[in-house]
Image: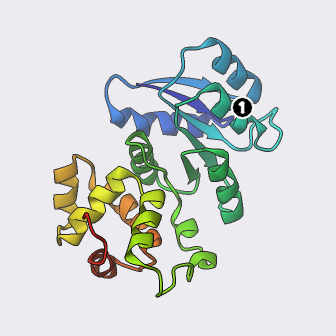
Amino acid sequence: MRILIADDHRLIVEGVKIKLAELGAETEFSVAMDVGQLRHSLQHDPAPDLALIDLAMPGGDGHAHLAETIRQLPGVPVIVLSGSEDPALMKTLLALGVQGFIPKAYSPEVMLSAVRLVLCGGVYVPPMLLQDPDDANSMTHDETTASMEERLRKLLTERQVDVLRLLSQGKPNKVIAHNLGISEGTVKIHLAAIFRALKVRNRVEAAVASRHISGL
């Protein structure tokens, strides 16, 4: 696996490399310290399997370099690294097409779990965005079962639906992780997305809500 890291802080780059090396012995890294180096890498280096891009880089103009990276690497997941924790910014970048947003204040373990989620086809959304009160009451009591199912299929990945299915059967995180071949940390990340999609606060409420969904 080849991972592109674009960040102008050497300590952050080295820390990310050390943690993501846990993905496997075959993990390789390429590094860009500014937007110029990033563009050179996009144009001349083999396409990576994953790109982690700093939002604020020397030579950058807003998030134009992110849009360029996404355009130059079709099919390659792009994750934003940022010192910001602004929910509005997160929404903007997720709408742009990034597969995740990781605040630099987060722990290395959270970053690793987020990367694993993205590599499995998911989208990592920070908890503070999942708890956005603007969406708190978007599902009404009159919503039909069919519309709920349709909504969930749009909001959740296939793997997250698998997690929800096992959750509805009363399986604990450890068993869910074992059955799906993922880490317990990744299960927790999937659960956060499930809770938001179902408009619930915990796994008990999620299990209750899932009983009204056919096909699980």
Q: Please tell me whether residue 135 is drawn above or below residue 36 in the rendered image.
A: below
Left or right of 213? Residue 178 is left
The location of residue 6, given as percent across then percent down, is 63, 32
Count of marks, rendered view: 1
Quadrant in the picture for the N terminus: top left
Q: Can residue 45 be seen in this view?
A: yes
Q: At 67% across and 15% down in the image, what residue appears?
A: 43
The location of residue 179, given as percent across then percent down, is 16, 52
Q: Please tell me whether residue 13 is drawn above or below residue 122 in the rendered image.
A: above
Quadrant in the picture for the C terminus: bottom left
Left or right of 125? Residue 198 is left
Q: Can residue 195 be seen in this view?
A: no
Give residue 61's quadrant in the image. Answer: top right
The three-letter code of the residue at mark 1 reads Glu
Q: 29 or 163, which lies in front?
A: 163
Q: At 36% across and 65% down in the image, what residue appears?
A: 191
Name the residue that disc number 1 marks: 68
The location of residue 64, given as percent across then percent down, is 77, 38
Q: 158 or 115, which lies in front?
A: 158
Q: 21 or 169, which lies in front?
A: 169
Q: At 19% across and 67% down in the image, what residue appears?
A: 172
Q: Please tell me whether residue 198 is drawn above or below residue 19 in the rendered image.
A: below
Q: SS at mark 1?
A: helix
Q: At 54% across and 45% down in the image, what residue appears?
A: 99
The location of residue 98, given as percent across then percent down, is 60, 44
Left or right of 83? Residue 181 is left
